[in-house]
Image (cartoon, rainbow, N blue to C red):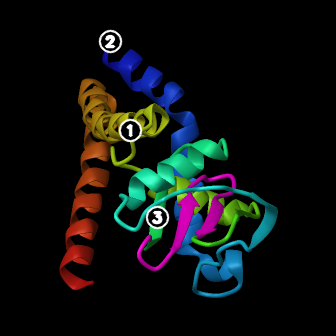
Amino acid sequence: MIRKIHLLLGMFLTPWVVMYALSTMVMQHRELVYGQKQRINPEFKVVREEPYQASFKTGDDREAVALQILKDLDLEGAHSVRGNLEQGKLEINRNRAIGSYRITWEAGSDTVKVEQQEFGLAFFLEILHRRSKFNQPYWMNDAWAVIVDLFIVAVLGWAFTGLWMWWGMKSTRKLGGVVMAGGILLFTYLVMTI
């Protein structure tokens, strides 16, 4: 049963294991991937600028206004909002790993500008790596967060089931013990010195 749990969790979570491995490589070796130490965010390009009639008031909740604009543009989903209605400008970032949208609404203007971020593989992997939490009111975001929690449990499970299987194989106990002791010593040394 332990081997089946170990195996089946690995099979189900293979896409996340590959994504976390590749995204960690991208973050660890930015100079190799980007040619510099900082992450390069892909550029935004205007995809449409369209008429938008709105009667928002300065006292309205900016989050509610952002939700309404996203709904009107058929772009509902995980987002963040900058600006405020008192200043008459909102910038809504509709966060998507495959290319975020930036929507700009200004009071007094009868248009709304929609820009989309170009796709960049390294940036895509970093966004997926950092995506977590139950902080958006959308079931797809919650599903991702549940799988991230499952991944955490699985990694811990792989460690414990691996130890369980190692202990059950008498022929590998000595070598496994030496390797594990070496890992613990190196881990402890690095934690104490870095």
Spot occupied by residue 38 in the image (x, y as percentages of width and height): 58, 84
Spot occupied by residue 26 in the image (x, y as percentages of width and height): 60, 67
**Quadrant of the snapshot with the C terminus:** bottom left
In the image, residue 87 above or below residue 151: below
Give SS at disc 2.
loop
Q: Which residue is mark 1?
A: 151
Looking at the picture, which amino acid does disc 3 mark?
A: Val
Residue 99 forms part of the magenta stretch: yes
Q: Is residue 115 left or right of residue 66?
A: right
Q: Which numbered disc, 3 or 2, marks the residue that appears first in the sequence? A: 2
What's the CA distance linking mark 3 and mark 2? 48 Å
Residue at (49%, 34%) from the top-left corner?
140
Looking at the picture, which amino acid does disc 2 mark?
A: Met
Residue at (58%, 49%) from the top-left corner?
70
Frontmost residue, 51 versus 103: 51
In the image, residue 179 above or below residue 34: above
Mark 3 or 2: the one toward you? 3
Residues drawn in magenta: 85-106
Give SS at disc 1.
helix
Q: Which numbered disc, 2 or 1, marks the residue that appears first in the sequence? A: 2
Q: Which numbered disc, 3 or 1, marks the residue that appears first in the sequence? A: 3
Marker count (numbered): 3
Q: Quadrant of residue 42?
A: bottom right
Q: Which residue is mark 2?
A: 1
**Quadrant of the snapshot with the N terminus:** top left
Residue at (27%, 76%) from the top-left corner?
190
CB under 8 Å between callouts 3 and 2?
no
Q: Which residue is mark 3?
A: 81
In the rendered image, the residue lying farthest to the bottom is 36
Q: Quadrant of residue 172?
A: top left
Q: Indicate which disc residue 35 carries.
A: none
Mark 2 or 1: the one toward you? 1
